[in-house]
Image (tube, coloured by chain):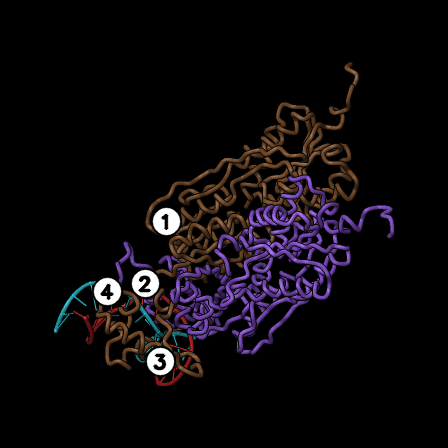
Chain colours: A brown, B purple, C red, D cyan
DNA sequence: TTGTAAGCGTTATCAC
DNA sequence: GTGATAACGCTTACAA
């Protein structure tokens, strides 16, 4: 009949009401609309509650009754631990937090769990809305969001017909990075790649970066060596840098699809005694906080603002509005990790 | 009677049941105990569900009925945006995420909101348990947790009678840091402080660090200049470093209560042209990931493991066990930012 | 100003 | 293998 009965039954609003000989509605009002009852009665209710150990309306029951939970879910396209290991993701989440906090909403972090099919955690979570951050288009989370008819905001992925999308100019940023290296005389460029997804389910924003690199090179004699992807961690950056330089010793500059990757590469180069930018230039993407101290040239994106916009969009959706999609700009930040290509920098080079 | 009626009534398990002429219980079984009904009926239920647009049991209703929400709340002692700006906090949360994810639980991030009195967000959140991370002992969140009788784990704060607490050897780590500087010949030390809380509501782990510094100096002729606190950000580190060096020019080493603070100080010193460790030694606390690249001597704490332990503890609590408190070790990591005190390093100093 | 009653959508138990 | 029933704990329009 009822679920496994707990050792002691918990105190409910009804208990408080019974104690005072009033109705449960009055107890509810004491908490939710103080103006609906006399201050004196309210005090008595609160006193009785304290006495009985009633700590206010049960959040679950209240949410069910009211039809909203006060929670915004964020699904991150990689395992949850990575969300915290990745400074860009942290920055993003911070922005979201700032936005939703203003309306008193809380943030629920949902894992992505690619393989789970229809049993996405997003399906079993009590949320009023969902932010899908860098999830592939075939993510069960998206299907779930659709099926449940949840207000949904897409971040860093391909636009979807009817959904609000927040993103950045991924391609333009990448193009600027590559052009910068070309202008410095580099002709043999390596790309440290982030996971591109499958062609059926591509990570659109990552592909856009690759396309941007390629666009910059179009019409030039320069060549691009693209690595496979080994993930998003600094360790991946290290391994990719090693592989790339072993396979293509002629490369004079590294285009990294994220600062995290770039920082891994930087470590490898320092360890190998290859001067940056003397022997090799390195350019990142994102401009995470630590990149300034490392003097890394990179493509800056307004990551925290992106989170803020995503948060605002979900808030608007919850109010019943139809917020527009937003595409934020990127900007090349030139620092010390990029310089003239070795050949081009040779002083007093004889002009032929 | 019922709440503001939505434009279209949502599809419920009852609708699906009605469509098929079966009972709601059967629909429920189709989702929750497939073995309780014939595969054939189950398929019909699922088909009808799809047809009607029923996307499975409502999480809220299910949670209410089952008496648990599948959510672990984490309250962070500072505003929520900071939780993401702070690498140590991110690392910690990552550990928690890893632990709770294994049981299929999700993480709800709750703001601290010191001033709110009894209306702590933790009181209105549907959670099965709470992790209080670096919250002061007078936090409304703690009061709320107690009042609601929620399984609670305390992290980085003073032990509380009956609650499970996860922490590190804050004092021992600090002591090792200070001793290290003494051994290098430093006699005039500055401390960049983290918020110590009020004496009524102290941040116990921060106080423990200060006490550790002091303990190391006891009996020596060395002196400690302690700054006020300006928060936890790198900016605070910068301002504190400037203030301290202006007020006490004789200081030859900086003991920073966190790496974030230390990194701010490092920037100021680099900008001011003061050599590290030539003119000034700097020691941090935490060993966040970026500190290795910056060659910062620091006190390493197993932050991610701390999160893992906290997650495991809450899991155990939810199973009805009584997990023990855990105190993890710290370890001094000597890198390049600490060296002999300027006087002591003078080469060929005449021996008197 | 307070009480009544009808759910919110689900699921565990028991009977069939 | 399937169905009726009774909660879970609360909120809110409406009546008194």
| Quadrant of the frame with the N terminus of chain B | bottom left
Q: What element carries label 1?
A: helix
The disc label shown at residue A233, or none: none
Q: Which residue is under mark 1? A: A317
Residue A40 is situated, as x and y percent measured from the top left of the image, at: 23, 73
Residue pointed to by mark 3: A52
Question: Does the residue at mark 1 contact the one at mark 3 (Cβ under 8 Å)?
Answer: no
Dot 2 falls on a residue whose secondary structure is helix
Chain bearing tag 1 is A
Under tag 4, what secondary structure?
Answer: helix
- The chain letter under disc 3 is A
Q: In the rendered structure, are the residues bearing label 1 and label 2 in contact, judged by CB atoms less than 8 Å apart?
A: no
Q: Name the residue under label 4.
A: A35
**Other residues around mark 4 within 10 Å, as few (<14) / some (14–19) / many (≥20):** few
- Front residue of A46/B268: it is B268
What is the CA distance from the residue labelled 3 to the residue labelled 2?
25 Å
Q: Which of the marked residues, 1 or 2, is nearer the chain's N terminus?
A: 2
Percent coordinates x, y for residue A121 in the rendering: 49, 60
Q: Looking at the image, is mark 3 or mark 4 earlier in the sequence?
A: 4
Q: Which residue is drawn at 39% across and 70% down?
A: B64
Spatial CA span between label 2 and label 4: 20 Å
Q: Vertically, is C2 above or below A319?
A: below
**CA gap, disc 1 and disc 3:** 40 Å
Mark pair 1, 2: CA separation: 18 Å
Q: Residues within 10 Å of mark 2 (few under 14, many from 20)?
A: few
Q: Do labels 1 and 3 share a chain?
A: yes
Q: Which of marks 3 and 2 is nearer the N terminus?
A: 3
Tell me which label, 2 or 4, sits earlier in the chain.
4
Q: Which of the two marks, 1 or 4, is nearer to us in this view?
A: 4
Q: Chain letter of disc 2? A: A
């Amino acid at each position: 009949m009822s679920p496994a009965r707990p050792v002691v039954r918990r105190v409910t609003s009804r208990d408080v009401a019974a104690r005072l000989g009033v109705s449960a509605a009055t107890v509810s009002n004491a908490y939710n609309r103080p103006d609906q009852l006399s201050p004196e009665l309210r005090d008595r209710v609160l006193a009785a509650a304290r006495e009985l150990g009633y700590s206010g309306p049960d959040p679950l029951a209240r949410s069910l009754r009211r039809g909203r939970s006060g929670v915004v879910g964020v699904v991150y396209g990689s395992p949850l631990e990575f969300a915290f290991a990745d400074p860009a993701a942290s920055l993003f989440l911070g922005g979201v937090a700032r936005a939703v906090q203003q309306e008193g909403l809380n943030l629920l972090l949902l894992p992505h769990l690619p393989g789970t099919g229809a049993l996405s955690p997003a399906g079993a979570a009590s949320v009023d809305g969902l932010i899908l951050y860098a999830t592939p288009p075939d993510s069960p989370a998206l299907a779930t969001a659709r099926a449940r008819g949840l207000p949904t905001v897409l971040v860093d992925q391909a636009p979807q017909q009817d959904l609000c999308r927040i993103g950045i100019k991924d391609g333009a940023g990448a193009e600027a990075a590559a052009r910068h290296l070309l202008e410095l005389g580099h002709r043999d460029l390596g790309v440290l790649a982030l996971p591109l997804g499958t062609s059926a389910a591509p990570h659109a924003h990552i592909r856009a970066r690759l396309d941007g690199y390629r666009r910059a090179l179009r019409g030039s004699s320069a060549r691009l060596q693209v690595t496979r992807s080994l993930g998003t961690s600094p360790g991946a950056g290290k391994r990719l840098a090693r592989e790339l330089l072993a396979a293509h010793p002629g490369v004079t500059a590294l285009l990294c699809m994220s600062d995290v990757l770039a920082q891994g590469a930087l470590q490898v180069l320092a360890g190998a005694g290859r001067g940056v930018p003397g022997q090799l230039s390195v350019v990142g993407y994102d401009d995470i906080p630590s990149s300034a101290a490392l003097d890394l040239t990179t493509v800056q994106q307004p990551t925290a603002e992106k989170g803020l916009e995503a948060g605002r969009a979900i808030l608007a959706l919850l109010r019943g509005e139809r917020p527009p999609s937003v595409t934020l700009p990127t900007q090349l930040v030139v620092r010390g990790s990029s310089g003239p290509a070795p050949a081009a920098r040779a002083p007093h080079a004889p002009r032929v």
